[in-house]
Amino acid sequence: MSALAKTQGSVSKRHESVEALLAAHPEEADPKKIIRRLAREKVAYAKSHGWNGPPFCPKELTSIFGIRCKEVHHDIRGDGRILKYPTGKIWIEYHGDRIPERKRFTIFHEFAHTFFPDYCDFLPRHQNAAKAAADDEKEFENLCDVAAAEMLFPAENFSADLKALSRLGFEAVHDLRKKYVASIDATTYRLVELTDSVPCAAIFLVDQKGDHQGYGPLWVRNCSKNPLFKSYLRPGISPPANSIVLHCYKNGVETTAPIKETWWINNQPRTWLVQATKLPDIPHSPEYPKIAVLLFPSGYGRK
C-alpha cells in the first residue's frame, strides 16, 4: 500500500496504464473521476451480491470478482502485490506483518489495479515501484489509493455517517476508523474529501527533514482539503514553534483539544481551529507521517 501520497499539479509524462485508462474512457479527461466511478460501480455490484458493512471486507469483495487473496510472510518488497497464475487466474498477496487496517487497505489498493485496461500486461513489471518513484508512477499509485478509499469507505455509507455527526474532529475520526477498521490517515482523508458543510483541511507531518526547508522537528508532507477550504499548505513548511501540533509530537499526546492558532503561510497570517493526533509508528517506513492535523475555520463550533 502506498502512504496515500498526494501528487499536486499535473505530470509531464503519464503512466502507460493511466493513458490506457483515459483511452478507454474518452468522454472524461480526468483520470481521478474515471477511477472513482469505476470503484463505485464495483461497490454497487458487490452490494447487490450481498457485500455489506461497515466494516466492508476486502477479501469478500475480491472473491465476488473471482480474485483470491493470500497472506504471506516472505519478502514481497512492499505491503502487497497482484499476480497472475500461469492459468491466467489473478490473486493478491499481502504481507502478514502489517497492522490489520493496513492489510485491508492494501487489498483494496491492489484490487484497484484491475480497473486499468492493461493491468494484465503490466503485472509482470508491477512488482512494487521504487521508493523514489517518478511522477507518472506516483499518479498511477495515487489513483489506486483513490479507488481503495472508495471501497473501504463507500460514499453512501460514509456520507450518512458524517451527516449524523454533531461536530467534526479527530474524536469523530477515531470513532469512524474503528467502525470501518481503517487507519487514522485514511479515515482523515475521507472525512475531508466528503465533508461539504464546512471548510476543512488535513495535513500530515513527518520528522524526516530530507529536502525540506525551514525549522523542524516536523515538516508538512502533504495537504488534503475540500473545495471550501481556500488556503494550501505546501510540502516542507513547519508549524509555528508554539503550535499544539508540536505539543502533540513532543509529549506523545494521543489527540489534542482543538485550539485557535495563527500560522504564517506565504508571509500572510492564517487563523484556524487546529487539532492534532498522533499516528502509529511504522518501523519499516520511517518516512511515514508522525502527526495528522485537522484545520477548520477559527469560529467553527462556536455557538
Image (cartoon, helix red, strand yellow):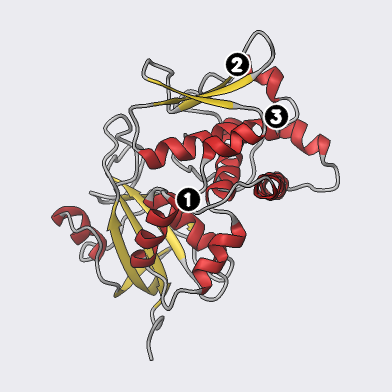
Tag nearer the camera, 3 or 1 = 1
From the viewer's perspective, is residue 22 above or below residue 173? Answer: above
Q: In the rendered structure, which disc, 2 or 3, sits on the residue that comes first in sequence? A: 3
Quick one: SS at disc 1? loop
Amino acid found under the numbered disc labelled 3: Ser
Residue 14 visible here: no
Which label sits on residue 125?
A: 2
Q: In the rendered structure, which disc, 3 or 1, sits on the residue that comes first in sequence? A: 3
Front in this rendered view, residue 110 or 56: 56
Q: Quadrant of the C terminus?
A: bottom left
From the viewer's perspective, is residue 107 above or below residue 126? Answer: below
Mark 3 to mark 1: distance in Å? 30 Å
Amino acid found under the numbered disc labelled 1: Pro
* Label 2 crowd bin: few (<14), some (14–19), many (20+), radius 10 Å: few
Front in this rendered view, residue 235 or 185: 185
Mark 2 to mark 1: distance in Å? 32 Å
What residue is shown with label 1? 55
Quarter of image, res 87 = top right
Which residue is situated farthest in the right direction here?
27
Give the percent coordinates (x, y) of residue 203.
40, 56
What residue is shown with label 3? 17
Quick one: SS at disc 2? helix
Q: In the rendered structure, which disc, 2 or 1, sits on the residue that comes first in sequence? A: 1
Which residue appears at 29% of the width and 41% of the height? 209
Amino acid found under the numbered disc labelled 2: Arg
Mark 2 to mark 3: distance in Å? 12 Å
Tag nearer the camera, 2 or 1 = 1
Give the percent coordinates (x, y) of residue 182.
42, 48
